[in-house]
Amino acid sequence: MQLTNAFEPTPEWVFELQQQFREDLTKFQAEFSGISEELNEIKVGIKAANEVIKSSNELMASAKERLTSANELMASAREHWKSAHTSLASSNARIESVSLERQIALKKMNEIEKKIEETKAVRAETDQYWNDLINKEIEKRN
């Protein structure tokens, strides 16, 4: 076994390796710092994207609620339309019925007016007959 002197000078290549290690470590730290900054930017981007997604989901839920409400309103409007259509058909049938009743009533009224006029004519003839008879009787007595 050979004894070495504790004060032996450190070879130059060790210093070169240490220097190379420091340079490589500095480069690594710089790259790591850059990657760390990029990761932070990515985290911020992800957080912003999550907020946008959350907001979009809320808007989508609101839109779905409004669509559901609109569909319910449309269904209600359809029911009202069907009801109105049924009422309109019923009203039209009633109007037609009343119109027919009116035509029948007008026809009967015209028949009654004709009979009244005929009766007036007969009455006028009868009155004339009796007036003539009364006048003749008065002339005879005078």
Image (cartoon, helix red, strand yellow):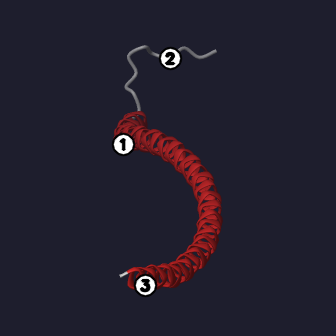
User: Residue at label 3?
Assistant: 140
Could you tell me how far apart the alpha carbons at marks 2 and 3 are, in whole angstroms? 195 Å
Q: Tell me which label, 1 or 3, sits earlier in the chain.
A: 1
Q: Residue at x 41, y 39 (%)?
A: 51
Q: Tell me which label, 1 or 2, sits earlier in the chain.
A: 2
Residue 41 percent location from the top left of the image: 36, 42
Q: Nearer the viewer, residue 4 or 60?
A: 60
Q: On the rendered structure, is 69 left or right of 35?
A: right
Q: Amino acid at mark 3?
A: Lys
Q: How many marks?
A: 3
Does 94 appear above or below 115? above
Residue 104 percent location from the top left of the image: 64, 73
Residue 116 percent location from the top left of the image: 54, 75
Badge 1 density bin: few <14, some 14–19, many ≥20, Cα 10 Å: few
Q: Amino acid at mark 1?
A: Glu
Q: Which secondary structure lies at badge 3?
A: helix
Q: Residue at x 45, y 15 (%)?
A: 5
Q: Tell me the mark number nearer the camera, choosing from 1 and 3.
A: 3
Does 46 appear above or below 115? above
Q: On the rendered structure, is 90 left or right of 3?
A: right
Q: Which secondary structure lies at badge 1?
A: helix
Q: Nearer the viewer, residue 49 or 133?
A: 133
Badge 3 density bin: few <14, some 14–19, many ≥20, Cα 10 Å: few
User: Residue at label 2?
Assistant: 4
Which mark, residue 41?
1
Q: Tell me which label, 2 or 3, sits earlier in the chain.
A: 2
Q: Nearer the viewer, residue 79 or 73?
A: 79
Q: Amino acid at mark 2?
A: Thr
